């Protein structure tokens, strides 16, 4: 029984850290720009497809594909922010959601045109494929790798935002755009840089998903963006600390639900979100309006 609980916990941690890798960029963009970017899941999808394509072009060098694939998606993110989103910042939230949802439909069709409407099998990675025994049962090595990557990303983002000059400028601009502009901060350029960085985080999650999800399919961003939104809402919109904790909770809840009460697994996440919102409408670490 103990080994079963340990493996369920490990599976939940890997799921949670995988969701966190995507939710971190979504949370950062909302926290700084105030934009609920529904197209963030599409950046995740494009990251997976670009990484897969570069794998074929570079002799199955996954790490080089993981480096270059998200950078290609950053170019897409720059175009989206600079020529479209920038003009809806002052508008009401529904306009932002409609625009970003339009990009979801556009990118889904673009993937079908370029890569086809069918699914694509994921490659295996030398050194990270297979499994290792933990308490007498095998556990995937790549899932352990994801469990390690998640906290490293969290620590890196904390250090960037709290311990660097650029992080102080970002926090100042997110708190008071007019004052930051008055003291010489180029707020539009800063927002573009933050959006590109958030896009890179989402695309990096997609690149890391290539060996994790098994199959790449058009529209694969929709399922992950729902989980990322749930995590962001539970943790508090704009709170990276809340998103990290929310991802852990959702990952563990999903894993235990799948293992012990699979009939109600799909409802548990939304029941938890409803309970949190009834208790704290602003989320666990969100600020009350």
Image: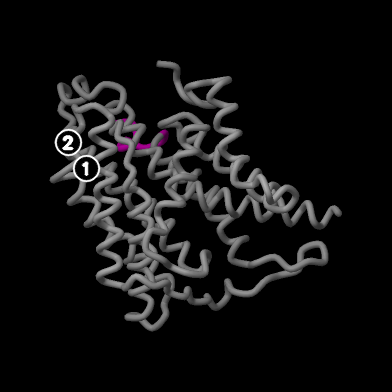
Position of residue 202 measured from the top left corner of the image (x, y, whole percent) = 38, 52
Q: Nearer the viewer, residue 115 or 195?
A: 115
Query: Which residues, given as a range, are shown in magenta?
Result: 162-169
Label 2: few (<14), some (14–19) or many (≥20) C-alpha neighbours in 10 Å: some
In the rendered structure, the answer to whether residue 25 lies left or right of residue 72 reads right
Q: Which color scheme did the rendering employ for the protein?
A: one colour
The residue wearing badge 2 is: 188
Q: Are marks 1 and 2 in contact (CB under 8 Å)?
A: yes
10 Å crowding of disc 1: few (<14), some (14-19), many (20+): many
Q: Quadrant of residue 180?
A: top left
Give the structural element (helix, strand or loop) at label 2.
helix
* Residue at 30%, 59% in the rendered image: 108
x and y, in percent, of residue 274 in the image: 56, 29
- How far apart are labels 1 and 2 at the CA level? 6 Å
Q: Nearer the viewer, residue 155 or 143?
A: 143
Task: Give the residue at x 34% y 70%.
Answer: 117
Q: Which residue is mark 1?
A: 192
Membership of 166 in magenta stretch? yes
Q: Split into 4 quadrants, where in the image is the C terminus?
A: top left
Location of the N terminus (image quadrant)? bottom right
């Amino acid at each position: 029984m103990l080994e079963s609980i340990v493996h369920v916990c490990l599976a939940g941690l890997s799921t949670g850290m995988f969701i966190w890798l995507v939710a971190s960029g979504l949370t950062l963009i909302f926290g700084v720009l105030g934009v609920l970017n529904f197209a963030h899941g599409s950046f995740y999808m494009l990251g997976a497809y670009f990484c897969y394509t570069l794998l074929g072009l570079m002799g199955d060098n996954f790490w080089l594909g993981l480096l270059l694939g998200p950078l290609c998606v950053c170019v897409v993110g720059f175009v989206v922010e600079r020529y479209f989103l920038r003009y809806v910042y002052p508008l009401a939230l529904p306009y932002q959601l409609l625009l970003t949802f339009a990009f979801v439909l556009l990118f889904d069709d673009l993937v079908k045109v370029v890569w086809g409407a069918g699914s694509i099998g994921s490659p295996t990675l030398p050194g990270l494929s297979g499994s290792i025994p933990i308490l007498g049962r095998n556990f995937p090595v790549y899932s352990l790798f994801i469990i390690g990557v998640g906290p490293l990303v969290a620590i890196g983002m904390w250090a960037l935002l709290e311990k660097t000059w650029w992080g102080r400028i970002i926090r100042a601009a997110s708190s008071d755009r007019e004052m930051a502009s008055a003291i010489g901060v180029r707020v539009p350029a800063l927002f573009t840089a933050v959006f590109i960085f958030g896009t890179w985080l989402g695309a990096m999650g997609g690149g890391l998903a290539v060996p994790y999800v098994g199959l790449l399919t058009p529209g694969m961003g929709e399922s992950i963006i729902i989980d990322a939104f749930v995590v962001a809402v539970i943790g508090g919109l704009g709170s990276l600390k809340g998103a990290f904790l929310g991802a852990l909770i959702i990952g563990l809840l999903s894993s235990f639900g799948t293992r012990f009460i699979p009939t109600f697994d799909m409802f548990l996440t939304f029941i938890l979100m409803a309970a949190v919102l009834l208790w704290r409408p602003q989320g666990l670490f969100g600020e009350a309006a």
